[in-house]
Image (tube, rainbow, N blue to C red):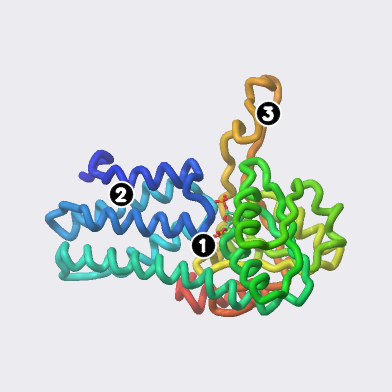
Amino acid sequence: MILETMIPPEVKQIARDIRTMRIRGAGRIARGAAKALKLTAKTSSARTPREFMKEIDKVSSLLLATRPTAVSLPNAIRLITAWPKQAKNTDVQTLRKMIISRADEFIKNSKEAVTRIGEIGSQRISKGDVILTHCNSDCALAIIKRAFMRHKLTEVFVTESRPMRQGLISVRELTKAGVPTTLIVDSAVRYFIRDIDKVIVGADSIAANGAIVNKIGTSQIALVAHEARVPFFVAAESYKFHPDTLVGRLVKIEERDPKEIVDPKRFPRAKIRNPVFDITPPEYVDLIITERGIIPPSAAYTIIQDLFKWKS
Ligand code: RI2
């Protein structure tokens, strides 16, 4: 039996960091999981392939239990462990090498995908555009920064993104890159929407019907953009497409500690709810920018089937 105590402390720390959101953002979470699997493979003292794969499974379960919504996490684990899991007549050394090289490959591809999304997406920005983004998405910011470098974009509006205020991370990053940035509270989006040419957000999961699961408040912004006829773009690597939704499973929406909103002791008679993601229907999404190209939300089904070969 593999005991919890046998999991390397650095791996437990990564799991803790994902849970507490020290490591956050769907892409970073996936790369964190890849790093954890690599560390496990490197330090394992398993004597048999069976023992080794049990350790990998144990760590996978620990990682999967951290946050439930971003499919990048299970997809990363699946992409790294699928082969080694099927390998027959192999030894521990070969399995170790497989996990390490697949984890390295995942991290490299993931970072390259973000750069590529920036490149592809920036071509959809017109000169003088004012962009609005929500929360903090590496993919969305890659497009914005690339477009700014190409002298296309004029200004970016960033929502604060309550309760964890990840919008402030975006503001820091964008101003560091020299992008003219305006911070607004989440509820000011409709007030400013007439000043906006395009909305660009990231995604934690994309369902087979093209619905987007992203930071709470995204769907309200999409609704406002739709009403004002402002194009709504989503930027996401292909490992954010959710294979389970092919068979009608719903994406679990994470509900975090109410303390992130306010100290519940101050309102002992009130119930405080803190769902941290919501679902934007595909009708409100104009296009999805991936590292493989731009697709309409209606093509999500095909992406999951063709690119991942994860058939129902
Ligand atoms: P990238 C974040 O979730 C936000 O919802 C963001 O839009 C999404 O991940 C994708 O981020 P959280 O971890 O992978 O802050 O594009 O809850 O960086």
Residue 236 in sight from this viewpoint: yes
Residue sitting at 63 percent across and 54 percent down? 170
In the picture, measured across the screen, residue 79 lies left or right of residue 280, that is left
Q: Quadrant of ligand 1?
A: bottom right
**Label 2 or label 1, whichever comes before in sequence order:** 2
**Label 1: which residue?**
244
Q: Nearer the viewer, mark 1 or mark 3?
A: 3
| Residue 22 coordinates in the image, percent (x, y) | 48, 45
Circle 1: element type: helix
Which amino acid, mark 2? Lys
* In the image, residue 110 above or below residue 135: below
How far apart are the two marked residues, 1 and 3, measured between alpha carbons?
32 Å
Q: Residues within 10 Å of mark 3 (few under 14, many from 20)?
A: few
Q: Which mark is residue 25?
A: none
When asked about the image quadrant of residue 99, the answer is bottom left
> What's the mark number on residue 271?
3
**For this rendering, which residue is in front, 233 or 302?**
233
Where is residue 74? Give x, y as percent.
Answer: 44, 58
- Per the model, the C-alpha gap separating discs 2 and 1 is 21 Å
Amino acid marked by disc 1: Asp
Q: Measuring 65% from the left and 67% from the top, which residue is drawn there?
A: 144
CB under 8 Å between discs 2 and 1: no
Spot occupied by residue 120 in the image (x, y as percentages of width and height): 61, 78
